[in-house]
Image (cartoon, rainbow, N blue to C red):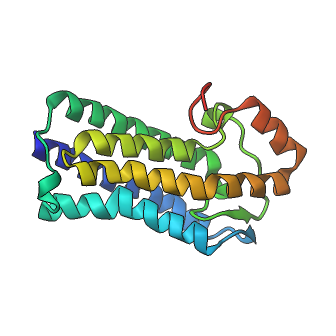
Amino acid sequence: MELIGQVIWVIGLVGWYIIRFPFERRAKRVQVVGRTRTATELAGLAIAGAGLMAIPLLWVVTGWPHRADYPAQLWSVVLGAVAFAAALWVFRATHKELGKNWSITLEIRDAHKLVDSGLYGYVRHPMYTSFLLMAVAQALLLSNWVAGLSGLVGFAIFYGLRVGKEERMMLETFGPEYRDYMARTKRIIPYLY
């Protein structure tokens, strides 16, 4: 069961990259007119990358740290597969809905528009929702306390360092329109938070 969880996680990670690659290429063609790139934001991205990719990949490839292993369970692998599928669906939908507005760092693009339909009609940051689902999936799929939980830790730190800055940037760019949008939506979990 442990190997099945690992294989599903690797397939999910490959799927994540396949989804992101064409959107990243297209976004590079659109001029950036505003940028908020700080050392804190870059550190958050690095921590998220370590927690959601590097640490679990190290465990999958080498088995380290093996002392943190525990027996894999069928129910956990099944729920993890469902959570990863949901994460990839949300991830793709957010990229598609953002279109040319998307960027990996905090940037405002030429002719940037406020997207408030589709998933963005329910939550302001569905991309973070996809990362949270991915972290939950990782915790369920990988039967190692360090590798499994590193995604949740990485996500929490990244989210804490970035979401406030992102919302300030959007308020500066869109003003009252974004303030109204904030009043009618939650951050990452529909109807809850």
Q: Is residue 112 visible?
A: no
Q: Residue furthest front?
A: 67
Rendered location of residue 38, percent (x, y): 64, 73
State left or right for residue 169 relative to residue 77.
right
Rendered location of residue 83, percent (x, y): 36, 35
User: Height in image: 121 above or below 166?
Assistant: above
Q: Quadrant of residue 67?
A: bottom left
State left or right for residue 134 relative to residue 25.
left
Residue found at x 63% / y 49%: 98
Nearest the viewer among 120 and 168 is 168
State left or right for residue 32 relative to residue 74.
right
Q: Is residue 134 visible?
A: yes
Q: Quadrant of residue 150?
A: bottom left
Nearest the viewer among 84 and 136 is 136
Rendered location of residue 57, percent (x, y): 25, 61
Rendered location of residue 73, percent (x, y): 15, 32
Residue found at x 66% / y 33%: 186
